């Protein structure tokens, strides 16, 4: 009885017998092409290592992709949060600057409303979420030059760090 040894490599089956004669027999009638080995009738690949699965992903690959997606999502949500905060701050600064200009123009054009000291108030029905605090004082240079300090607050958030301040000088003739 002749002892036979068989070895399959890349779709080719090599057989060696007692005669030390080797012959190559094609198991598939086609030489290997460098692609995946042909499938058997059950759908499994011939000569495929038991750990490879070209039709799906491993659990590790899925977990790594989930971590990457979660990290990207957290970054996007953080940027969105910062964007909303910056947009709110820009809206406040623009509105507060315009309201301060309006108040200073009112003081410049209204001689009976121009009085030394501190005053507080709001901006009426148009801007109920804003309030102001003003201080008018004489400078030491002449009796007709006044320092006007005006601070506009956002009454909606009740935060003191969200304010806009402007300081200017006004000249008033003594009457």
Image (cartoon, rainbow, N blue to C red):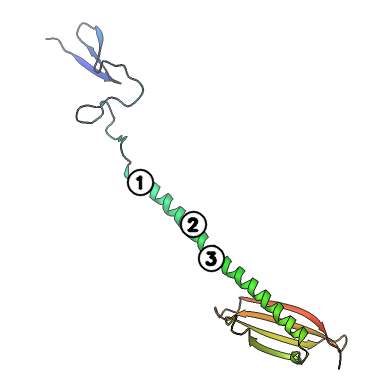
Quadrant in which the N terminus appears = top left
Point out residue 121 in the picture as x, y percentages from the top left corner.
Answer: 64, 87
Badge 2 or badge 1: first in the primary sequence: 1
Residue that carries the numbered disc 1 in the rendered image: 62
Q: Relative to 95, is 115 on the left or the right?
A: right
Q: Residue at x 28, y 20 (%)?
A: 11
Q: Secondary structure at mark 2?
A: helix
Find disc 3 in the rendering and name its residue: 84
Disc number lying in front (2 or 1): 2
Under circle 1, the secondary element is: helix
- Quadrant hosting residue 7: top left
**For marks 3 and 2 on the same chain, the one whose residue lies earlier in the sequence:** 2
Residue extending furthest right? Answer: 142
Cα distance in 3D space between marks 3 and 2: 12 Å
Residue pointed to by mark 2: 76
> How far apart are labels 2 and 1 at the CA level?
21 Å
Q: Nearer the viewer, residue 80 or 15?
A: 80
N-terminal label among 3 and 1: 1
Residue, x 14% and y 10% (percent of image)? 2
- Secondary structure beneath dot 3 equals helix
Label 3: how many residues lie within 10 Å, few (<14), some (14-19) or many (20+)?
Answer: few
């Amino acid at each position: 009885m002749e002892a036979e040894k068989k070895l399959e490599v890349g779709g080719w089956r090599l057989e060696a017998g007692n005669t030390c004669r080797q012959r190559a027999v094609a198991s598939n009638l086609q030489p290997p092409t460098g692609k995946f080995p042909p499938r058997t009738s059950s759908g499994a690949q011939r000569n495929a290592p038991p750990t490879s699965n070209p039709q799906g992903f491993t659990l590790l690959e899925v977990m790594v992709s989930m971590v990457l997606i979660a990290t990207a999502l957290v970054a996007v949500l953080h940027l969105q949060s910062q964007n909303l905060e910056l947009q709110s701050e820009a809206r406040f600064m623009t509105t507060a600057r315009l309201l301060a200009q309006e108040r200073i123009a009112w003081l410049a054009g209204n001689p009976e409303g121009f009085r030394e000291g501190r005053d507080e108030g709001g901006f009426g029905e148009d801007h109920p979420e804003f309030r102001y605090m003003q201080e008018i004082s004489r400078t030491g240079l002449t009796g007709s030059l006044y320092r006007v300090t005006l601070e506009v607050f956002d009454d909606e958030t009740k935060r003191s760090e969200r304010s806009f301040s402007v300081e200017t000088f006004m000249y008033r003739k003594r009457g």
